[in-house]
Amino acid sequence: MSTPAAGRGGGEQLVYRAGASLLYRLLLGLVLAVLTVTLLGGMLLALLVPERPHLLLAAVALVMLLVLAGGIALLLRPSFRVTTQGLQVRGPLSTRRLGWSEVAVVEIDRSLTNRGAVVIVAKDGRRITSALTGSRFALYRGEPISDHGHDLLQPARPARAAIDTHRRWLHGAL
């Protein structure tokens, strides 16, 4: 999903955002709904036993539901954002932001595990890889795998957006 940067101005404008596609979100929502109904049904059955309610069983079902919902929230959290101010790489548990003044170069990862992913090389030598932008996550982002080329090493939409915006920043166009 990408949006063009609108005009010049003082504020930060979104150039590109990669995250979970609508289809992926709907599928996870459906899975969560089915499991919620199942676990709540089991919890109600445990509580409505005529002689003695099984509170421990109901508590276990509730904890399982909370853990499941938290896990799904962590699955949907990763994203990669390119703005006129810099880059943001958000993982399941952490967020890293780099302004364009901190970025030396944007590269493509050639390793087998993150093939085609965006690697941000900072001026201080740090290398930040956004696994979400790799070829194996293309369908998760709702983008075609063919964007990565036949060898999966061509710059796809996330890399092109980061590289183009960094070049515009270097030339003073932002």
Image (cartoon, helix red, strand yellow):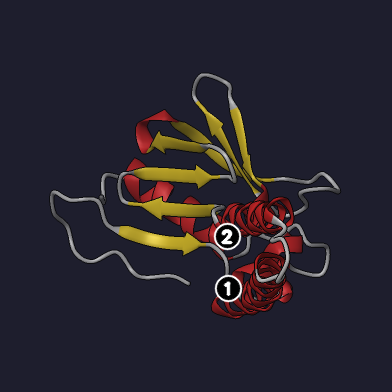
| Residue 21 coordinates in the image, percent (x, y) | 57, 73
Q: Which residue is mark 1?
A: 25
Q: Nearer the viewer, residue 81 or 95?
A: 95
Q: Amino acid at mark 2?
A: Leu
Q: Nearer the viewer, residue 164 or 128?
A: 128
| Drawn side of residue 72 relative to residue 52, left or right | left
Q: Residue furthest left?
A: 10
SS for dot 1 = helix
55 versus 37 height, above or below: above
SS for dot 2 = helix
Mark 1 surroundings within 10 Å by alpha-carbon count, few (fewer than 14), some (14 through 19), many (20 or more)? some
- For image coordinates 71% across by 75% down, the residue present is 38
| Drawn side of residue 50 relative to residue 7, left or right | right
Marks 1 and 2, the one that precedes in the sequence = 1
Q: Nearer the viewer, residue 134 or 55?
A: 55
| Drawn side of residue 131 relative to residue 111, left or right | left
| Real-space Cα separation, disc 1 to disc 2, in angstroms | 7 Å
| Residue 159 coordinates in the image, percent (x, y) | 57, 56
Q: Which residue is mark 2?
A: 76
